Amino acid sequence: MDLQLTGKVAVITGSGRGIGYASALALAQEGARIVITDINPESVEQAVGSLKQAGHEAIGAVLDVCDPEQVQTMADLAAHAFGGIDILVNNAGFTRDKYLLKMPVEDWDSVVDTILKGAYYCTKAALPSMMERKWGRVINIASRAHWGNPGQTNYSAAKAGLIGFTRALALEQGKFNVTANAIAPGLIETPLVRGLSTYETLRTNALARQPVPRLGAVEDIANAVAFLASERASFITGELLHVTGGRYAS
């Protein structure tokens, strides 16, 4: 299926590895030109190198999404190299797990700021290009944690907020042919997840609650990103897509 992304310019935050890199690769395979961004310089260099080695167009920027100056520099780089931004995937985020009464304000701020303030800065920097072109896609990586997870009040609140951000943005930007959607991954078997001390418990619980008898792969999320970025999804906006193996089907 031709997703009609040839020549489109895609910025993916937190794309040095994991879901972010898989999404960048999926978009590149559909012909998009890629801007890799990550807070880790080595991850940026490695991801850009891998894409170029596979024959794709890619540049990279070391980026703290909470720094508006760095975000604007990244947007300027995309404009200089590729002419602007058509697709933005707000993927940067992390969690620091603690129950609320034991959670220092620094843990709250760092998680909420990266997810929400990062999406604010990056979207605000990308929108002028999309509005001028009368075409754009904003895809926000939310989480099944928006339902609420114990020990993750910071992460759950931020991801729930990101969904509200997505829906409001869709209402604002539809007249410019700019869509905004969110994806809520289930348990995705990344190296980080496999390294958790609770991995086996998480795996057992997930498989008991979902009809598809396997954990998610990063490619499952990347394929959803590519579809929502495409012309095939031009009439879809303001939606939350659960990619969870059917965990919330009932």
Image: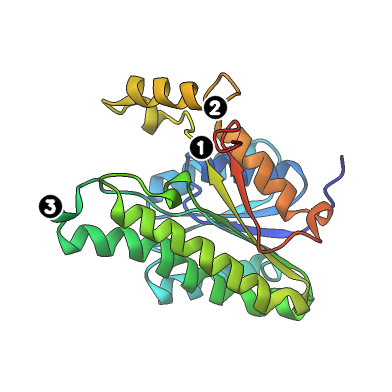
Label 2, residues with CA under 10 Å away: few <14, some 14-19, many ≥20: some
Picture coordinates of residue 17, whole percent (x, y): 47, 40
Callout 1 amino acid:
Gly
Question: Residue placed at 76% from the left, 78% from the top?
Answer: 176
- Residue that badge 3 annotates: 102
Please say which color scheme the image uses.
rainbow
The residue positioned 59% from the left and 30% from the top of the image is: 245
Q: In which quarter of the view is residue 213 placed?
A: top right
Identity of the amino acid at label 2? Gln
- Asked if residue 249 is positioned above or below residue 171 in the image, the reply reads above
For the question of whether residue 209 can be seen, the reply is: yes
Left or right placement of residue 171 versus residue 13 in this view:
right
| Disc assigned to residue 91 | none
Front-lying residue, 113 or 81: 113
Q: Residue type at mark 3: give it.
A: Lys
Q: Answer above or below: position of 200 versus 25.
A: above
Of pointers 1 and 2, the one earlier in the residue sequence: 1
Position of residue 11 in the picture relative to residue 200 (left or right): right
Q: Is the residue marked by circle 1 packed among few (<14), some (14-19), or many (20+) residues within 10 Å?
A: many
- Residue at image mark 1: 186
Dot 3, crowdedness within 10 Å: few (<14), some or many (≥20)? few
Q: Decide: marks 1, 2 in contact (CB < 8 A)? A: yes
The label shown at residue 210 is 2
Q: So how many labels did they put on this image?
A: 3
Look at the image and tell me whether residue 129 can be seen.
Answer: no
